[in-house]
Image: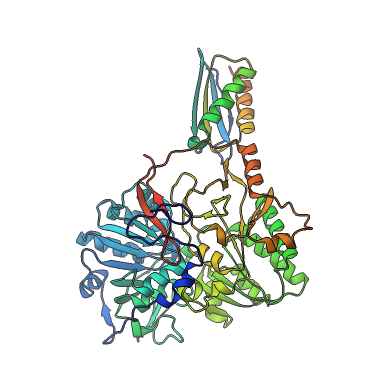
Amino acid sequence: MKNCLNRFVPEGFASFNGSNDYKNHISEYKKIPEKKKTSSYKTLGSIGEIFDYFNITNGSTLSFHHHLRNGDAVLNLVCVEIKKRDLKDIHLAASSLFPNNDLALHDLIVNQNITKITTNYLNGKTAELIGKGKLKEMLVMETHGGRARSIETGELKIDLAIIATPCVDKDGNGTGKEGKNACGVLGYAIPDLHYAKNVVLVSDTIKEKIENPELSNEYVDGLLIIDSIGDKNGIVSGTTNITKDPVGLKIARDATKLLKELGVIKNGFTMQTGAGGTSLAVASYIKKEMIENNIIGNFASGGITGYYVDMLRNGLFEKLYDVQCFDLLAVESSLVDKNHIFMDASMYGNPYYNNPIVNGLDLVVLGATEIDLDYNVNVTTDSFGKIIGGSGGHSDTANGAKITMITTQLIKSRIPIIKEKVTTISTPGEDVDILVTERGICINPKRQDLLQKLENSKLNIMKIEDLLKLSYEITTKPANIERSNEVIGVVKYRDGTIIDSIYKLKE
Amino acid sequence: MKIGIAGTMESSDALITVRPSEKINIKVESTVFDYFGEQIKKTILDTLNELNIANIDVLCQDKGALDFTIKARLITAIERMKKSV
């Protein structure tokens, strides 16, 4: 079956039918009952005891969050136990997977201990292994908001949520903001906490009493204290600094000029950017603009970096909505600043949440590995079909925000970023409004309102077809490459429908 | 043995190694081979023709260089080969 974007949808999955189709199904949206706990939590002595107490067997679904990012040790410890018991057909439902999980997951996937993975983002060797077709069942890739929806509706049924928790108290409450491995807010763990059949907190710090815990003990069935849940320094992975690359800076400058011409940067405006170097450079030019014109924004949201904490402290934004902290300055701020506000995954981007934060965004600035003539964006695979990430909050924010802007270099290592058709659709073109590259800016023709405002602009605004032609003049036209027809995974849009499939890599 | 090397293995560059040979042998290893492998071979061959060279081994280890980079690296490698002892 093909969906409305002419992409293949494997049997057993619903077909993507437009980014706002969810609005036709709001009355059908039903949550499963939140979990109810009958007694106080059980103190457990080891990962093995967790498996025994909660009866983890072949075919169980185990869930994890990724707030410790590349510093997480808990998922890896659980993998050791799965291997030791040689459990089969485990379904791993982790909100994201990082390279530090690669070693632990390799054998479990190859030996079919883990046969199914549901996640929002993955890269590294695990992604490569799955790309080669080594995962027995389908890889299901969700968005951040979509995963919350999946869990709330029971589409993703979790037998046991194993929640790495930087600090717990004696009543069984938990928080991410304190403890020796404090990693900040735990927004992505909340759906798991509320809707998993069972919940266990795994921590390395216990205190008498936590004030206002994000993880309430009314959902907690078990508690395990271990020596270390990982390394909090691992949360700072990838680029979380402003780019120094002159091309990136030029893109960011032009992007900001454009936003100024569109009148986006004004009192009370709201924004989100990614944590990548170019996105942060855009934020830095917007900041300058705000200071020069005494503009105070309403809120910034997302994964939060120290850069936004700084803007909050300097009064440039009234508040921050934070689903996960990208550095230790953000962690500290989440604990002490009352305007640094916690949001869970559902409040952030679940389409069926009553007015999620993404719907309040005036602007989101995002990246792309590919964008095509229909403005569809790929952040899931590279141009060879190799899995390199995933939507995360890309399609959630793109759908919610009034203006979705993609900033990217026109060409990366000879690969033109603009395609006739993207390799994999992560975010549909109907939700993408502006593309800013170093050699030209494109406006989605469906945004005639923006084009009208820019009629007298001196910026280099051109048709995306012409910018593609310009890319080919530089790189020459890439040859057509043959890809395998074997589907190894699906890209699930935030409403649960399939927007595209992921194919096995050629040997 | 005569040899000429130019370029780097940095992203968007190419490392080109040339040696004298009986005829033209071109070997291309590239991170973008599927998309541009044939084009890279063509660029190398065209450049050799322009220089009237018909007896050379060319190894191009490419990290996504544009054609003009490949051409410049190739010419430099050939000049270095000529000067080597």
Q: Based on the displayed image, in which of its 4 quarters is residue A264 positioned?
A: bottom right
Q: Which of A489 and A288 is in front in this view?
A: A489
Q: Based on the displayed image, in which of its 4 quarters is residue B9 positioned?
A: top right
Q: Is residue A190 left or right of residue B53?
A: left
Residue A386 visible to an observer of this rendering: yes
The percent coordinates of residue A470 (x first, y second) are: 66, 41
Residue A224 visible to an observer of this rendering: no
Residue at point 73%, 51% (across, down): A460
The percent coordinates of residue A411 (x first, y second) are: 60, 45
* Direction top: furthest residue: B22
Residue at point 44%, 47% (across, down): A386
Q: In this view, does A186 lie to the left or right of B7?
A: left
Could you tell me which quadrant the C terminus of chain A lies in? top left
Determine whether A271 is above or below A114 in the image.
Answer: below
Q: Is residue A92 left or right of residue A264?
A: left
Q: Which of A429 and A199 is in front in this view?
A: A429
Residue at point 52%, 35% (across, down): A479
